[in-house]
Image: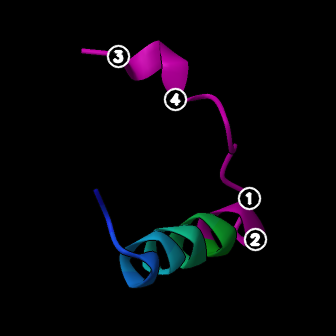
């Protein structure tokens, strides 16, 4: 399991991408 710092790092990336106009929450189409 990821520790809290890893989770925060991932959330920072998500927030940054969302701020740049990326769609958040649509990854279901990319399941492998």
Nearer the N terminus, badge 2 or badge 4? 2
Q: Where are the magenta residues, as a range?
A: 17-32
For disc 4, the marked residue is 27
Residue 6 in the magenta stretch? The answer is no
- In the displayed structure, 31 sits above or below 23; it is above
Nearer the N terminus, badge 4 or badge 1? 1
Closest to the camera, between mark 2 and mark 3, is: 3
Task: Specify the label residue 21 is tagged with.
Answer: 1
Closest to the camera, between mark 4 and mark 1, is: 4
Q: Distance between the residues labelled 3 and 4?
A: 7 Å
- Residue at image coords 31%, 64%: 2
Q: Distance between the residues labelled 2 and 3?
A: 24 Å
Apparent side of residue 9 relative to residue 23 in the rendered image (left or right): left
Task: Specify the label residue 19 is tagged with.
Answer: 2
Which corner quadrant holds the N terminus?
bottom left
Closest to the camera, between mark 3 and mark 1, is: 3
Task: Specify the label residue 3 is tagged with.
Answer: none
Out of 3 and 16, give the one closest to the viewer: 3
Apparent side of residue 29 relative to residue 20 in the rendered image (left or right): left
Q: Do the residues labelled 1 and 2 touch (CB within 8 Å)?
A: yes
For disc 3, the marked residue is 31
């Amino acid at each position: 399991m990821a520790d809290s710092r890893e989770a925060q790092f991932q959330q920072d990336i998500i927030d940054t991408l969302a701020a740049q106009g990326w769609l958040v929450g649509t990854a279901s189409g990319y399941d492998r």
